[in-house]
Image (spheres, rainbow, N blue to C red):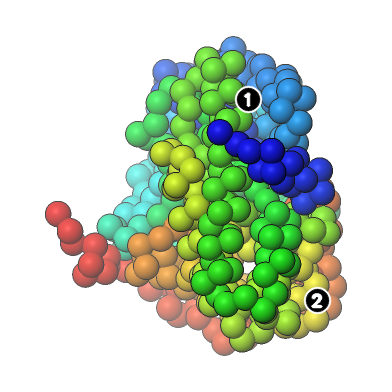
Amino acid sequence: MLNNNEILETINMLDNQNLDVRTITMAVSLFDCICEDAQKTANKIYDKLMNRCSNIVNVGHEISGELGVPIVNKRIAVSPISLIGSASGGYLQIAKALDKAANEIGVDFIGGYSALIQKGASLCEKKFLETIPEALSITKKVCSSVNVASTKSGINMDGVKIMGEKIKETARLTAENDSIGCAKLVIFANAVDDNPFMAGAFNGIGEGDCIINVGVSGPGVVENALKKLRGADIAAVAETIKKTAFKITRLGQLVAELAAKRLNCSFGIVDLSLAPTPNIGDSVAHIIEEMGVSIVGAHGTTACLAILNDAVKKGGVMASSHVGGLSGAFIPVSEDIGMIEAARSGHLTIDKLEAMTSVCSVGLDMIAISGDAPASIISAIIADECAIGVINNKTTAVRIIPVVGKTVGQEANFGGLLGTAPIMPIRKGDPSAFIARGGRAPAPIHSNRN
């Protein structure tokens, strides 16, 4: 039972510390929509989404009103479209059907325009990859992800090369809006099947027909809790973060169970990632600074982030038997006011962010670079991040935006939760010969566990 102090504490978290349910994501299997005719496949997908997901926005509003809990986003994730469209090849028709359904249902984004090519790509998947830039340029709400590496398989360097080129093409096709199409495209190592966050959400092969996954976020709550611990040792800091994550996760599980019941779905997981926003008081960077580093990016940042991530996971798994997704702390530069400030001042660099990704939930996220950056450098950044994920058996990702027409010293403005991104400098060395080699980087020795 909760005592009165705990109830009042939770109310204060909601009212004053930016505690929210960041997303309710309905993950839907589309395998029953496959047929050999492209338009029929697209129509069946549209019909299924309208039938299964049409009430998700209303249910989100109902639960939010009843519990007094802000539910920021309502989203849909679907089975990887590279597989669903393989029989017909009508990938762009499917993209349009996804976007139409998302717009009519009223969700913020729909994820799953995805491919899993960590060991290699079939002919159909290669054709699918070619459609990604156009699909993201002709739709507003469709998000895409490609898994190019895993600890078990190694790194598909051919896929890495292709995706560097596709990111550049996507940037060009959406240049009029600061190349925003790239904000809807993420490249993974060790992608998970039950991630509720965009742009990487898809309904994994081992998932059920219709699942509710919830993402809860409360950077402001953690920062506020740490303000009461100035001068305390680091063990006390970790313990406080763990207890705070426990409370946040319990709230997420309650919302997930209610949503699953009302939408006639299975309850999947609670992802307890601390996902920031550009709003003041909702920053992972400011948590790190409250831990004792003067500005995020300074020496000590990676250690603070590791302690934060570990404590969040420990608190979450105590609160729910169904913690999943990515669960930890996100460091998207454009979506975190503290990260934005540190990048503007030059304290936060891509090199430092890469080090931080070895201990955070995902990877290099929402990073804007000069639009004239060559595709080979983008591919090399992806390869570096994949290496961290593969060797450390963790999920890593790259969501990088080469903003056409802008360079270091300027900024891209994506609006809303996507925020503002200072154009960050990249290293000038040439990795093109390395990327041109292609092939598959072998899996690490510790992957052989059968």
Image coordinates for residue 364, horizontal then vertical, percent:
59, 65
Residue at label 1? 97
- Which of discs 2 and 1 lies nearer the camera? The answer is 2
Q: Is residue 222 above or below residue 23?
A: below
Q: At 52% from the left edge and 39% from the top edge, which residue is drawn?
A: 270
Q: Is residue 446 above or below residue 428?
A: above
Q: Earlier in the sequence, mark 2 or mark 1?
A: 1
Q: Amino acid at mark 2?
A: Arg
Residue at label 2? 344
Spatial CA distance of label 2 from label 1 is 39 Å
116 lies left or right of 354: left
Q: At 61% from the left edge and 45% from the top edge, which residue is drawn?
A: 248
Regarding mark 1 in the picture, which secondary structure is present there? helix
Image coordinates for residue 294, horizontal then vertical, percent:
73, 82
Q: Quadrant of residue 420?
A: bottom right
Q: At 55% from the left edge and 75% from the top edge, which residue is drawn?
A: 234
Q: Quadrant of residue 427?
A: bottom right
In this rendered view, identify the residue nearer to me: 415 or 9. 9
Numbered tag placed on residue 221 in the rendering: none
In this rendered view, identify the residue nearer to me: 355 or 287. 287
Q: At 54% from the left edge and 66% from the top edge, which residue is drawn?
A: 238
Regarding mark 2 in the picture, which secondary structure is present there? helix
Disc 2 to disc 1: CB gap under 8 Å: no
